[in-house]
Image (spheres, helix red, strand yellow):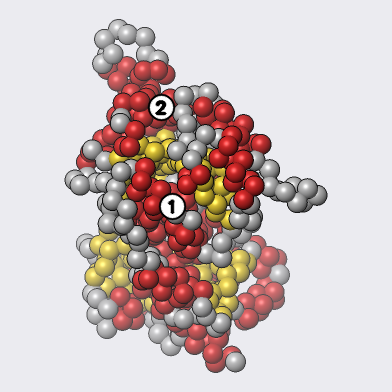
Amino acid sequence: MPKYIFICGALISGLGKGVVTSSIGKNLQIRGKKVNVIKIDPYLNIDAGTMNPYEHGETYVTADGSEIDVDFGHYERMLNLEMKGDQNITTGQVYQSVIDKERRGDFLGKTVQVIPHITDEIKRRIKSIGEREPNLDVLIIEVGGTIGDIESQPFLEAIRQVRREMVSEDSLLVFLTYILEPPNLKEQKTKPTQHAVRELQSMGLSPDIIISRGSHALSDSAREKIVMFCDVPANAVFSLPDLDTVLEAPIYLDKQGLGSTLNLMLRYEDIAADWLEYERLIERFTKTENIVQIAITGKYTELADSYISVKEAIHHAAAHNNVHAVINFVSTEEYEDNIEKIHELNKFDGILVPGGFGSRGAEGKISVIKYARETKVPFLGICYGFQLSVIEYARNESNLEKANTSEVDPNSPHPVIDLLPEQKTVDEMGGTMRLGKHKILIKTNSILEGIYKDTETGERHRHRYEVNPEYIDILERKGLSFSGRSEDETRMEALEIKDHPYFIATQFHPEFQSRPLKPSPPYFAFIKAAKQRSEQRT
Ligand code: GLN
């Protein structure tokens, strides 16, 4: 059985628990330990698939086709692991399985209660993930929400029970807090943290390690107060201020002794970490003066978290092209009323139209794609961006007037994008799209083949609509090439056009498999083309 590290947060949401979880994982990984992660989300949704990205950030998609919390992107990228859907435990899943068991009569007439039935189910889920992987050393369990939330109480009680059942060096509780620094006082205040720890203690839980977030590093006097009032040893308080890149977080914490403290507390041999290779990686991300300006169009322009994997994939690709990408969000709705304004896009080195749903901003995005195609700005379309590129080409190059996706216009005379056949009988929204990793066949001698350096690949998906097979020939006759297809060749997976510096769109989401050390091929080639444009400009 692995050791467990539980991570809880206090005071405010958005503390960066995902970054801390990944940083702790990285510190163990670099010392040769095998780690994995569970994220508990105390909401009633079964998964993140039906949640508004405005509220919760993007929905991340795993290879096994689960729609999962955005933090899994951080874990997979930082820890270079492939995770499974059941590693995201939600209140909805826990209650659903307990209620299903009750209906089957599994509880033999007993009154079904939060304690022990809900807590038992939580424990069962955590343990089953811990046990399924051979030789797993540490399972890190991040508890979403903040201490004091009603929703997280059954989870904290389950954690209390699990910790009670284990010897002390086999489980740790890491408490993440926020240190206030009122500008008029110019002093770091730890009182809210002290109260939060007391609240945690009232639930029978005590922190072993405290990590403080804040805009500045923790002062000595604040550190002393935390040690004194929060019942932790001096070597167990760490500071994590805002950093230039989250990649620095694992080293930043280790420089304060996090690795040693973990070794000591978990009774591991105290080996130091060799960060050399990792530091080189960070350098790639920070040490460049060349800039490319990238535009991302989209509906959720206000909340950059909705496109976090897209942004990260751009940064990975940029780092490996020795440039820094500046990401600009452009709202396409403005172009719908004022098409002249679209010429402002000329200042960008690359335009990316990401995934999306529904009609808002769709016409504006189609105009953006036309602009990118005609004025030869490097272009990458992802999922909805791919579908809208097909519509743009159908309307403007193939004489298919009013071509559309049936998602936007169910009465279009030319539904070039239509529901996947298996979707026509689906009524439920949750977990019913075409999801997860599927094989893609790549046309020989295509641009895509040059990008992937292969004639097949596997990428992750999340869509309900696809290219209508009836229009494939008409579109290809006019020069659009579907250079990526599904294994049975019925589904169009990628398109490209010639005589353009870079015009590629994919039905799949390559960003989900992009990693700091291994950028996604279509993103890498996109940034390469953007770099060329920026160099030509200067
Ligand atoms: N709305 C489109 C579909 O359902 C695209 C989805 C997406 O971009 N993820 O197929």
- Kindly tell me whether residue 469 is visible in this rendering: no
- Ligand 1 lies under 8 Å from the Cβ of mark 1: no
Residue holding disc 1: 258
Dot 1 surroundings within 10 Å: few (below 14), some, or many (20 or more)? many
**Closer mark to the observer between disc 1 and disc 2:** 1
Element under label 1?
helix
Residue holding disc 2: 160
Element under label 2?
helix
Q: Is residue 272 above or below residue 169?
A: below
Q: Residue 493: x and y, percent?
A: 34, 66
Q: Could you tell me which quadrant the N terminus lies in?
A: top left
Amino acid type, mark 1 = Leu
Residue, x 58% and y 49% (percent of image)?
213
Q: Is residue 343 above or below residue 239?
A: below
Residue, x 26% and y 41% (percent of image)?
2
Asked where in the image residue 197 lies, by quadrant, the reply is top right
> Could you give the CA–CA distance between mark 1 and mark 2, rounded to whole angstroms?
24 Å
Q: Mark 2 and mark 1 in contact (Cβ < 8 Å)?
A: no
Q: 166 or 147, which lies in front?
A: 166
Q: 199 or 237, which lies in front?
A: 237
Q: Is residue 179 above or below residue 392?
A: above
Q: Residue 124: x and y, percent?
A: 29, 29
Q: Residue 497: x and y, percent?
A: 41, 80
Q: Is residue 300 left or right of residue 404?
A: right
- Kindly tell me whether residue 215 is visible in this rendering: yes
Dot 2 surroundings within 10 Å: few (below 14), some, or many (20 or more)? some
Asked where in the image residue 294 lies, by quadrant, the reply is bottom right
Residue, x 33% and y 43% (percent of image)?
266
Q: Residue 388: x and y, percent?
A: 48, 65
Amino acid type, mark 2 = Arg
Q: Is residue 475 above or below residue 100?
A: below
